[in-house]
Amino acid sequence: VRAIISKARKRKEPICSSSKGYWLTNDPDELEKNADSMMERANAIMSAVNGMRGAAFKLRVGIDTQYKLFES
């Protein structure tokens, strides 16, 4: 289903989504709001990817990447 929705969105179909599912809309403001939400999630994912790549680099060059996450 996700692949079908992605393909339809790339064809500029007015499809919104949430945790409750997908729906068509005729409201451009709703589409923009939904697109903004997707962009925020994409940016958060890219930040995590960059962090993971940085950690991989540190491991390759022997820099200690262990963190004490639960100490105050």
Image (cartoon, rainbow, N blue to C red):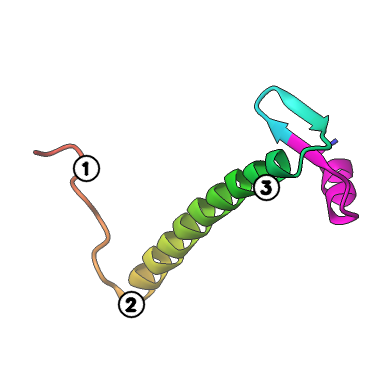
Nearest the camera: 9 or 3? 9
Q: Nearer the viewer, mark 2 or mark 3?
A: 3
Q: Amino acid at mark 2?
A: Val
Q: Secondary structure at mark 2?
A: helix
Location of residue 51 by image quarter: bottom left
Q: Are marks 2 and 3 in contact (CB under 8 Å)?
A: no
Residue 19 image point, x, y percent: 65, 26
Which residue is tagged 1? 69
Q: Amino acid at mark 3?
A: Glu
Residue that badge 2 annotates: 61
Q: Identify the residue at image location x=87%, y=53%.
A: 12
Q: Which residue is mark 3?
A: 32
Secondary structure type for disc 3:
helix
Can you say which quadrant of the picture contains the C terminus?
top left
> What's the CA distance linking mark 2 and mark 3?
43 Å
Magenta segment: 2-16
In the visual, does 4 lie left or right of 63?
Answer: right
N-terminal of the pair, mark 2 or mark 1, is: 2
Task: State yes or no: discs 2 and 1 in contact (Cβ < 8 Å).
Answer: no
